[in-house]
Image (cartoon, grey):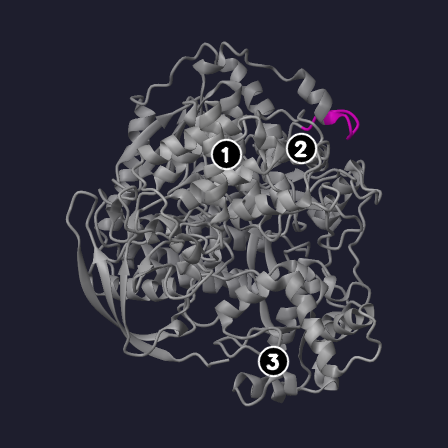
Amino acid sequence: MKLDSKIPEGHISQKWTDYKDHLRLVAPNNRPKIDIIVVGTGLAGASAAASFAEMGYNVKAFCYQDSPRRAHSIAAQGGINAAKNYQNDGDSTFRLFYDTIKGGDYRAREANVHRLAEVSGNIIDQCVAQGVPFARDYGGMLDNRSFGGTQVQRTFYAAGQTGQQLLLGAYSSLSRQIGLGKIDMYNRHEMLELVKVDGKARGIIARNLITGELERHSAHAVIIASGGYGNVYFLSTNAMGSNVTAGWKVHKQGALFANPCYVQIHPTCIPVHGTNQSKLTLMSESLRNSGRIWVPKKKEDAEAIRAGKMKPTQIAEEDRDYYLERKYPAFGNLVPRDVASRAAKEVCDAGHGIEANDTNEGVYLDFSTEIQSKGKQTAYAKGNHNPSQEEIISLGKKWLEEKYGNLFTMYQKITDENPYETPMKIYPAVHYTMGGVWVDYNLQSTIPGCFVAGEANFSDHGANRLGASALMQGLADGYFVLPYTVSNYLADDIRTGKISTDLPEFIEAEKNVKDLINKFLTNDGTKTVDHFHKRLGNIMWNKVGMGRNEKGLTEAISEIAALKEEFYKEVYVPGSADELNPELEKVLRVADFIELGQLMAIDALQRKESCGGHFREEYQDAEGETLRDDENFKFVGAWEYKGYDISKEELHKEELKYEFIKIAARNYK
Amino acid sequence: MSAAKNINITLNIWRQKNSQSKGKMETYKLNDVSTASSFLEMLDQLNEQLVNERKEPIAFDHDCREGICGMCSLYINGRAHGPDTGITTCQLHMRMFNDGDTIVIEPWRSVAFPVIKDLIVDRTSFDRIQQAGGFVSVNTSGNTIDANTIPVPKDDADKAFEAAACIGCGACVATCKNGSAMLFVGAKVSQYALLPQGKVEATNRVLNMVRQMDEEGFGNCTNTGACEIECPKGISLENIARMNREYLSASCKG
């Protein structure tokens, strides 16, 4: 198979404009003859579905939640980037493009990323027109903040709920089209198979999660916008239902899966509390502006803390290791996410972790220095040039409360500890997956008519995503890319007519799904679905997590293969197929996670370099930083499914060309 | 800080096979629940126990488990989202309970939220209200005006945001003695009423959304204020007053 990325010719700044101008169109009178299926209603799915319906296509949209408004885009906190340069700090389309490529450690496609930067401004315009209440300054203009180590203020936000506000904006557009009858919305439905007719994507099999009925839905094109696969680790910041099934089914039908080993591990999450934990909660990256990260220098202090015999506030300043400030004096606590996460793992592995859980994994995020400095500043600003220690502390706490009050409250609700009095405990957690279904410049997979958008595809973030870029990509794909490229594809379908769901391909696909469901329900094993999911997560976190090496990855591959055998033999699923059955929903998702997990380990083993979120311990420089190998690994690794045995998957390489950006090493020292 | 410990509890939970069947309360014993667990992790633990005993697990709605998606619900010991304020059920922790406690768990109770199974209810009535008018009629184009063309006073933008922070969980309806959805609808109407982008369609919006709200079988507001107290996002009663003003003025125009 030859991978054709279909990147247009021309200068980077003109590619998308010229390309768009020459794409084929479908006339308004023909659009009602064409059906489009959209799977997932997050930022990418909801914005695509609404846009297609506005254009006049018939849309069917699917989500597993009880309402499209609940897709996990809603949980994004920080913001959305756009190259508006409202703050007059020299921002431009090129700079956003450059920062994104560099942030991705030179493993993303230039043309896709430039297009993303080009449409970023349109997204903000569109959202404001929809009534999205972004933060504003006293002049009534939109406010911006800095994010993730960039040198400009290009992040638009709505308090700590930017994802929620953008998703509700897209949901309002979606709702309008549902009300107008242009979108059929299928809540509580899960896509369980892609149906191909004559090699083209022509429909899906979906299960109605309330009645259990399997439904056949046909269309002229199928859009997968089902999000990322972080839940392969069991514990992540993803929603409980977030899954890879739609993307994985497409993969098994012939679409290549690209860079599965690129996973973003976010440094500031609340540590694991025990074996019954179901998910991890993020504490916004913005806290690193005011908090200092440290662990006890002495192992015996760390032990005493874990045993509850000592408190962090009792450890003297000289006995604390502010390891980020020590290792990265230039960026200190504000190094990028992947760097901060690895450093936390390193100190915990060395025995300095402070959390009293099974793994001792946890470090401190301490606000006491900030309380002192801001308290003093505030006192001086009020004309008190000789404040007492009590006055300083009280004013400092007040300053923190104004800035981060809601996050501090959230932390206290979860941990029952007061972060104004004692340092927060944090540890990295799986957050976002850069890999996904391989797509060309049109966002089309290697299956004609099957397009993939948002986190579900691999295209824009390379080996590491910058903060506030996920929301930008989801909406760019849905509002401003797919409407053009999908129409171009559908121009051939104006005479096709309705696709019958009685075709043998639909009957066979439905039968396969039914057989799989029956297999699980009649398996009569001895272990629950979660039992297997947790074991998979354990393997993934320990061997395909923040630090990876050849030995661990090789072990992971065979352990996951063995786990798969045991899973199919021993899993027990209660209930029946024709009812609401959450255990059945889970088993179908976990089956796909197990296969994907194995492929992630295979991909990580193949990539003998360190880049972004992918850190191979064998490939680091003398100071322990990532060591890229541009000579041999400057490619997208795209995998082709070859049957039940995942170790047989075949690697295809798409060479990455950097014509407009000069490749350099990332340095944060 | 209180160290996590394990407690033993008794649970009285509403079980109902499907929307047609009759439900009833059933009692379960659950031991060794860590007080550091969230309430939903406690239910996970119970379900794991039930599945291992070859019994049917309890169906309940949940997704993000960080208080923002609005999917979790549950009426716990007679309160929507349980005995703590400003949070959703997924943010409730077991340290709020004591060893030996009996905890009563019911689904949201409202005519407009029929039970689907056990603790899961159908809240699509909220979606239909949104479809009736909860939007600005602007198509995707990339050619709307520049985002900074119309300044919006910070106070209005902040108030619109506070209203838009509603997560659509339905606690307001569940806790209201009249089963009223006016806090939910008021918040959506207010968001648009406060922004210049929402003004053009203001008249039709409020009329259509209120009409749909009534058709769905939600009750009326009698200013008790329970909704505001139980709302996990602190949506203010002011929004209901604003909706009433909008409605009155729209009715006069209409």
Q: Which amino acid does label 2 sit on?
A: Asp
Measuring from the top left, give residue B103's x and y in whole percent: 28, 68
Q: Quadrant of residue A429?
A: bottom right
* A416 displayed left or right of A504: right
Q: Secondary structure under badge 2?
A: helix
Q: Name the residue under label 3.
A: A351
Q: Residue at point 62% right, 87% down?
A: A301
Would you place residue A494 above or below residue A636 in this image?
Answer: above
Figure check: A320 above or below A624: below
Foreground: B109 or A7?
Answer: B109
Looking at the image, residue A273 sits to the left or right of residue B18; the answer is: right
Q: Nearer the viewer, mark 3 or mark 1?
A: 1
- Residues rendered magenta in the picture: A7-15
Q: Is mark 1 on a helix, strand or loop?
A: helix
Residue labelled with disc 2: A125
Number of callouts: 3
Q: Which mark is residue A57?
A: none
Residue B226 included in the magenta stretch of the image? no
- The Cα–Cα distance between marks 2 and 1, rounded to whole angstroms, is 16 Å
The tag earlier along the polypeptide, 2 or 1, is 2
Callout 2: chain: A
Query: Disc 3 vs disc 2: Cβ atoms closer than 8 Å?
Result: no
Quarter occupied by the N terminus of chain A: top right
Judging by the rendered image, the residue that carries numbered circle 1 is A172
Q: Residues within 10 Å of mark 3 (few under 14, many from 20)?
A: some
